Amino acid sequence: MAKVIGAVVIDTARCKGCELCVVACPTDVLALQPKEVNDRGYHFAYTANPDACIGCASCATVCPDACFTVYRQVIK
Amino acid sequence: MNTQDIIKPENLVASRPRLFTDAITHYCPGCSHGVVHRLVAELIDEMGLTDRTVGIAPVGCAVFAYNYIDVDWVEAAHGRAPAVATAISRLNPENFVFTYQGDGDLSAIGCAETIHAANRGENIVIIFINNAIYGMTGGQMAPTTLLGMKTATCPYGRREDLNGYPLPISNLLAQLDGTCYVTRQAVHTPAAVRTAKKALKHAIENALAKRGTSVVEFVSTCNSGWKMTPAQANDWMAEHMFAKYPLGDLKNRQD
Ligand SMILES: Cc1ncc(C[n+]2csc(CCOP(=O)(O)OP(=O)(O)O)c2C)c(N)n1
Ligand code: SF4
Ligand code: SF4
Ligand code: SF4
C-alpha cells in the first residue's frame, strides 16, 4: 500500500510560540521548546516527533505567522 | 527515508504566501488576524490580482496590514474604510477593492459607512474580523460583545439592561438589497480555514463580476483581550461565539 510521508521546516525566528500548530497536528509531530527561546523570547515550535509527519499541512493552515513550509511524498 | 530526502521542491505542499513581506507582524501570538491575512494574500496571488488590488486598512489592530501584504493599500480614518473603498472602486472599476475591518471599526464608529456602502451595492469585499472586543485599545466592550462577556469596560460582564444586546451586524447587512453575498466564517481549525478560503474566493469573484457588496465575517479570537491562551480562546469562541454568530452563508445571490 502507498504510504504518505511528510516533513516540515519551521521558521523559528518568526514563531511566537502560540501552540496552535501543536494543537492542530493530527499525529503529534510538534511541540514547543520547553526551555529554549528565540531572539524575541518565544518558546518556538519544533518537530519533537518528525517521523510521524504525514505532510497534511494542518500546521501551516492554522499558523498565524506563516512559519511553515510543508513537504509530502507518496512512497509506492 | 529520512526527513532531508523529503524536502525537495517537487514535494512542496505549503509555504509562506509570496505576497507576504518579510516583516514580523505586531499581532499577539495566536491572533486570528494572521490567519486571515494569509488567506487574503494567497487568494490575491492565486487569482492573479496582485497588480490591480487595493486594500483599505482600518484603525484597530490591523492598522498595519499594509506592512504585511505586498499590494497597494490606503489607510482610512477609523470606520471610514467602506467610504474610501467606494471612491477607489468607482474611480478604478478595473481594480479589486476590499476593506479589512474589526468589529469596533465596522460596527461601532463606522456603522453608518458600512451600512450605506453595502446598501449602495458597492462592488467591494468587506472583510470583517469579529473578535467581540476592541483589541487594539486594551479590550473594551464592542457592539458585538456577548452578553455576560467580561471586558475592560464591563468588568462584571455585559448586561442587556445597561449595555444593550450584541449587534449581529452581518444579519442586518444581509437584509440590504445592495449585498449579494454575506457569510460568516472562522479560522480556528484547518477545516474551517479551508472553508473560509472558498468563501473569500467567492466574495472576490463577486466583486470582479460587479455583483454588489460581499461581506465575509470572520468570527475571531482576541486571546489577549479575552485573557486566555490562543488555544483556549479558540475553544471559547467555538463554545460561546458561534451560538450568537453561527457560521455559514447568510445570503448568496447569484445574478
Ligand atoms: C476617531 C477615533 N476614535 C477612537 C480611536 C481609538 N481606537 C483605536 S482602535 C479602536 C477600536 C478597534 O477595535 P476593532 O475595530 O474591533 O479592531 P481590533 O483591534 O479588535 O482588531 C478604537 C476605539 C481612534 N483611533 N480614532
Ligand atoms: S504537516 Fe501535518 S503531520 Fe506534519 S507537522 Fe504539520 S500538521 Fe503535523
Ligand atoms: S502556529 Fe506558528 S507561531 Fe504558533 S507556535 Fe506554531 S509555528 Fe509558532
Ligand atoms: S490585541 Fe487581540 S486582536 Fe489585537 S493583535 Fe492582540 S490578540 Fe489580536
Image (tube, rainbow, N blue to C red):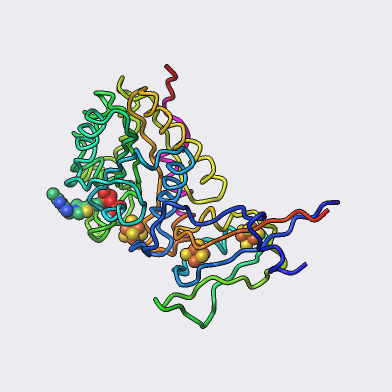
Is residue B126 visible to us here?
Answer: yes
Which quarter of the figure is the N terminus of chain B placed in?
Answer: bottom right
| For residue B163, above or below residue B168 | below
Q: Is residue A63 magenta?
A: no
> Residue A13, image x and y in percent?
46, 72
Q: Quadrant of residue B206?
A: top left
Image region (quadrant) for ligand 2: bottom right
> Residue A6, image x and y in percent?
69, 60
Is residue A25 visible to us here?
Answer: no
> Residue A71, image x and y in percent?
64, 58
Q: Nearer the viewer, residue B46 or B181?
A: B46
Q: Residue furthest top?
A: B255
Q: Quadrant of residue B218?
A: top left
> Residue at horizontal 30%, vertical 22%?
B178
Q: Nearer the viewer, residue B210 or B187?
A: B210
> Residue B182, image x and y in percent?
39, 30
Q: Is residue B242 magenta?
A: yes
| For residue B15, above or below residue A33 | above
| For residue B4, above or below residue B123 | below
Give the magenta-colored segment's residue range.
Answer: B235-251
> Residue at horizontal 44%, vertical 57%?
B233
Which quarter of the figure is the C terminus of chain B placed in?
Answer: top left
> Residue at horizontal 35%, vertical 46%?
B129
* Residue B119 horizontal side relative to residue B227, left or right: left
